[in-house]
Image (spheres, grey):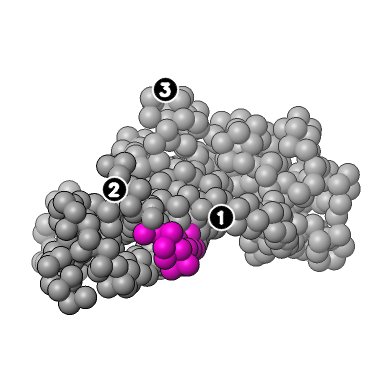
Amino acid sequence: MRLLLSISITLLRAKLKQSIVAAVGVTFSIAMFVTLLGFMNGLNDLLDGLILNRTPHVRLYNELKASPEQPIESWYDQGVGTDFPPTHHFVRSVKPKDELPRLRNGSAIMKALENDPRVLAVSPRLVAQVFFNVGTVDLNGQVNGIDVMQEVRYYQFSDYLVQGDPKDLASGNNTIVLGKGLADMMEAGIGETVQVTTATGERSILRVVGIYQSGIADYDKVQCYANIKNVQKLMSRPSSYYTDINVKMHDLLQAPAAAKEFAGRFGVDALDIQTANAQFETGSDVRSIISYAVGIVLLIVAGFGIYNILNMMIYEKLDAIAILKATGFSGSDVRRIFLLLSMIIGICGGIAGLLFGFALQTLIDNVPFVTAALPTVTTFPIDYNPKYYIIAVTFALLTTWVSGWFPARKASKVDPVEIIRGK
């Protein structure tokens, strides 16, 4: 094997320029493969994070809707109207039940969920529709009452807080965090006060302790955040009054089944994260498929380059192959020589490609990327997952081996008698 390797290196050096060109093709392909996948998956993680970081795995709520069974239906079902001939009843303009959009037994539901081993975290939420009074103008808004520290820990709330400290919101009385769009319209900054009117007509003065920017402009013109106790006080509701319960699961994939189970178990409406963001996940999958497809095509193109160079080398080295066979080398030895030559090109090009790819990823990761829509992002996103490097090297070596196999097989079948007789 050492002798065969030595002969392969000799042939490689004899056609050094062509060998370098083939290795550069592998290097470029692997570098682009690693860089493209790292960038595209980093972008996917960034876009997914905009939604998934703020979205609970399962949301429990009580949707106000009309009763599925009207009293007239119950009247006939009980047999009261059996003396009448067959009739059809029509009920128009059915209205929802006259009840509050709250979760009944919210505290008991939260306690049951906290004891569930599948559940990572449970956090309540109280959503209040309000008006912000700015002089003679009323701006529509929505105040989300949250457990601040739970939101910071499990939903990256502080990552979107461009001004202020979440601890001030958690510990302060009558405090609020405004969406950036709403704060700009009211020209309200940290430390200033805003007047809020609830849907029931109750007014309150709240102090601004932070500015929140999600990256979705329409969302930031309406959404605000406050401690859930302050919102309960603002709405004159008891401490057990919740409109939503957000559930974070240990395993995201269990969310659809858990949502159905919780809905039936607690008699509430439930929405899982996969259902809420189905279109968004489809977009991420399509981008990943395109990235892999482009990267693999680049590696295949590099394989064709190696194939062509080895083919030309065989035709130019027919004399050397004939001499090798005439001096006792078998066809399998000749095949191994050219396979070794191909793998040397692939390994050298692969190592260089990984280094070059990592350098390109690092370069892109340090390119400034500043946009008002994404305040927490300062550079282009890159995913340095080692699996991209492993996939690139594995596929590159496989491609170079296949590319070298056919020319090597052809070289092993060369008849030395015919070559020497022709010369």
Q: Quadrant of the N terminus?
A: top left
The vertical placement of 335 against 420, above or below, is above
**In the image, which residues are magenta?**
11-30
State the image coordinates of residue 344 (x, y, percent, origin top left).
38, 52
Q: Amino acid at mark 2?
A: Leu
Few, some or many residues within 10 Å of mark 2 (<14, 14–19, 20+): some
Q: Amino acid at mark 3?
A: Asn
Dot 2 or dot 1: first in sequence order is 2
The front one of 357 and 327 is 327
24 in the magenta segment: yes
Q: Answer yes or no: do the residues labelled 3 and 2 have beta carbons within 8 Å?
A: no
Prevailing SS of the magenta stretch = helix
Q: Secondary structure at mark 1?
A: helix
The residue under the point 86% across, 59% down is 187
Residue linked to disc 2 = 4
Dot 3 or dot 1: first in sequence order is 3
The front one of 188 and 358 is 358
61 in the magenta segment: no
Question: How far is mark 3 from mark 2, CA to CA?
Answer: 67 Å
Question: How far is mark 3 from mark 1, CA to CA?
Answer: 50 Å
The residue under the point 58% across, 41% down is 155
State the image coordinates of residue 409 (x, y, percent, origin top left).
18, 62
Residue linked to disc 3 = 115
The vertical placement of 124 against 82, above or below, is above
Quarter of image, res 191:
top right
State the image coordinates of residue 331 (x, y, percent, origin top left).
15, 56
Few, some or many residues within 10 Å of mark 1 (<14, 14–19, 20+): some
The front one of 247 and 8 is 8
Q: Answer yes or no: do the residues labelled 3 and 1 have beta carbons within 8 Å?
A: no
Q: Amino acid at mark 1?
A: Phe
Q: Which circle marks residue 356 in the picture? A: 1
